[in-house]
Image (cartoon, rainbow, N blue to C red):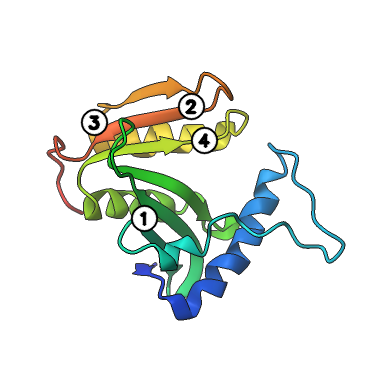
């Protein structure tokens, strides 16, 4: 399978918007999300900022053999004690889960944005937490910290890509 990762230009932002509907559907297992009378989930808040905020937000599409397979939204955190980069959203379509695409895409993004990272999950989403423990653990050789948000209880993993001695695949 040939894997790809591409920065999404403004002309294609609707692609991310449509994929966000599938992403939000997945979250109905963990959060109280409802569709409107047209069968749509609410628009993702702040999605337009990924094309309008300068150099601090990065929308990416993942592809497998030239077909869209998922997306990631990465934020550069400014003046934050939480780190320099935040994996704001990360979605792999079910067809491509457990194929290695998600691990490959996450590792590529970590390589592209060297620095201190934060990756969070909804507390109830045990599959996502397992995925991120595995992906970050492999990337860092187990060198990450996990903390829980005191209000919502959601877990976040913190790590630096700068201290990683990894062999590029």
Report the residue marked by disc 1: 105
Name, please, the residue furthest toward the right. 37
Looking at the image, residue 131 lies above or below residue 25 = above
First in sequence: mark 2 vs mark 3: 3
Name the element at disc 1: helix
Badge 1: residue crowd in 10 Å (few <14, some 14–19, many ≥20):
many
| Real-space CA distance between mark 4 and mark 3, rounded to the nearest whole angstrom | 20 Å
Quick check: 131 left or right of 116?
A: right
Report the residue marked by disc 4: 121
First in sequence: mark 4 vs mark 3: 4
Residue 41 x, y percent position in the rendering:
73, 57
Report the residue marked by disc 2: 155
Mark closer to the observer (4, 3):
4
Residue at the spot 51% in from the left edge and 35% down from the top edge? 121
CB under 8 Å between discs 2 and 3: no
| Real-space CA distance between mark 1 and mark 2, rounded to the nearest whole angstrom | 21 Å
Report the residue marked by disc 3: 141
């Amino acid at each position: 399978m040939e894997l790809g990762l591409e920065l999404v230009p403004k002309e294609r932002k609707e692609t991310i918007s449509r994929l966000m509907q599938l992403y939000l559907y997945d979250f109905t297992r963990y959060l109280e999300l409802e569709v409107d009378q047209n069968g749509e989930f609410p628009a993702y808040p702040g999605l337009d900022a990924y094309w309008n905020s300068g150099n601090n937000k990065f929308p990416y599409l993942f592809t497998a053999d030239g077909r869209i397979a998922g997306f990631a939204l990465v934020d550069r955190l400014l003046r934050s004690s939480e780190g320099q980069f935040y994996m704001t959203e990360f979605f792999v379509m079910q067809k491509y889960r457990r194929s290695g695409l998600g691990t490959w895409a996450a590792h590529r993004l970590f390589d592209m944005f060297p620095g201190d990272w934060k990756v969070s999950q909804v507390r109830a989403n045990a599959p996502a937490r397992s995925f991120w423990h595995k992906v970050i653990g492999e990337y860092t050789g187990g060198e990450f910290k996990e903390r829980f948000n005191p209000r919502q209880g959601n877990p976040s993993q913190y790590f630096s890509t700068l201290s990683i001695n990894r062999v590029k695949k």
